Image: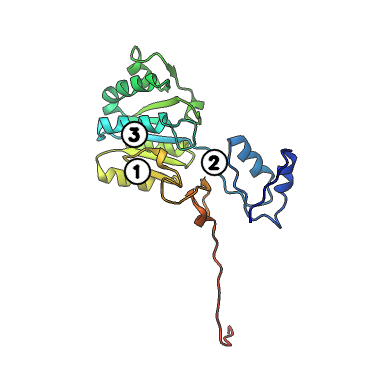
């Protein structure tokens, strides 16, 4: 059954959130403010479509051209959505080769970089739209063409950064080293992890789930991109012939 609540009065939302005898699940689709309000006021379980602070880590063994295309797609193709990259992590051994090329293309697309000290030193004179990153930038979901960039000394540092600042939404690594890719896959806690691919694929339709209901960052039941089947629950049916429990 599908019903439309025709009123535009926001008070109706608060009334709806109290109807735990009628409504089984709330799936808020919108900005962080909406989701926070729903979670704070709901008496009904909420499937949180939380903010996406998505990272792409360019590993020391990455193919430079592949890394450039993946990072640009993750940020530029549609920057206003939750699966767009918000922070780029680059291994120090590739930074001098990769970052100037990437920065020029990002700036040509209208982008701005908020960089760590090493990034600022490397890109000074290479890019006009360059600003120092503050602590708040590592937590930022920009939802536009702004990008935080950090040069890291190791994959361990990249994983630690994601652990501290990530939102457990979608994370990616670009590498030609299979064991390192598998380690990243196993150690990064996120609802979707990508190897040599853009975080923009973190989408129910793209993953073959049909119409997407949301991308859950919850730790119970459905997690990650959700189709309709993710909303199903178990029903136990027992056919007996007089059995009793002793």
Q: Name the residue nearer the viewer: 53 or 31.
A: 31
233 is higher (above) or lower (below) than 15? below
Report the residue at 50% width, 30% height from top. 143
Toward which corner of the image does residue 195 lie, by quadrant? top left
Q: Which residue is the site of mark 1?
A: 184
Label 3 to label 1, Cα distance in Å? 17 Å
Q: Report helix, strand or loop for mark 1.
A: helix
Mark 2, residues whose alpha carbon is within 10 Å: few (<14), some, or many (≥20)?
many
49 is higher (above) or lower (below) than 74? below
Q: Is residue 243 left or right of residue 153?
A: right
Toward which corner of the image does residue 121 lie, by quadrant? top left
Mark 1 vs mark 2: which is more N-terminal?
A: 2
Report the residue at 66% width, 39% height from top. 37
Q: Which residue is the site of mark 3?
A: 70
Mark nearer the viewer, 3 or 1: 3
Quick check: marks 3 and 2 in contact, CB under 8 Å? no
Q: Residue furthest bottom?
A: 242
Quadrant, the C terminus = bottom right
Mark 3, residues whose alpha carbon is within 10 Å: few (<14), some, or many (≥20)?
many
Q: Is residue 35 left or right of residue 120?
A: right
Q: Which residue is the site of mark 2?
A: 50
Q: Looking at the picture, how far across and down is residue 74, in whole percent?
A: 39, 33
Q: Looking at the picture, how far across and down is residue 68, in whole percent?
A: 31, 29
Mark 3 vs mark 2: which is more N-terminal?
A: 2
Q: Looking at the picture, how far across and down is residue 30, in whole percent?
A: 58, 38
Determine if residue 167 is in view: yes
Mark nearer the viewer, 1 or 2: 2
19 is higher (above) or lower (below) than 72? below
Q: Name the residue nearer the viewer: 88 or 199.
A: 199
Q: Name the residue nearer the viewer: 1 or 245.
A: 1
Q: Is residue 162 left or right of residue 217?
A: left
Report the residue at 47% width, 35% height from top. 53
């Amino acid at each position: 059954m599908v019903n439309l609540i025709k009123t535009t009065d926001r008070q109706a939302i608060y009334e709806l959130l109290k109807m735990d005898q009628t409504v089984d699940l709330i799936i808020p689709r919108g900005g962080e403010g909406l989701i926070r309000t729903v979670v704070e006021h709901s008496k009904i379980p909420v499937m949180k479509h939380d903010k996406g602070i998505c990272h792409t880590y360019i590993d020391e063994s990455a193919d430079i051209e592949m890394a450039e295309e993946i990072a640009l797609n993750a940020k530029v193709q549609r920057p206003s959505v939750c699966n767009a990259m918000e922070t780029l992590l680059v291994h120090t051994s590739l930074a001098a080769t990769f970052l100037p090329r990437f920065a020029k293309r990002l700036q040509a697309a209208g982008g701005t970089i908020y960089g760590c000290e090493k990034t600022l030193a490397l890109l000074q004179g290479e890019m006009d739209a360059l600003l120092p990153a503050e602590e708040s930038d590592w937590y930022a979901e920009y939802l536009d063409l702004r990008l935080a960039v950090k040069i890291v000394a190791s994959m361990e540092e990249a994983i630690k950064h994601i652990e501290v600042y990530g939102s457990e939404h979608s994370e990616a690594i670009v590498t030609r080293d299979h064991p390192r890719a598998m380690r990243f896959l196993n150690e990064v806690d996120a609802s979707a992890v990508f190897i040599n691919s853009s975080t923009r694929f973190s989408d129910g339709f793209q993953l073959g789930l049909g119409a997407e209901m949301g991308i859950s960052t919850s730790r119970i039941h459905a997690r990650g991109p959700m189709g309709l089947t993710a909303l199903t629950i178990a029903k136990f049916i027992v056919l007996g012939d007089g059995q009793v429990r002793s």
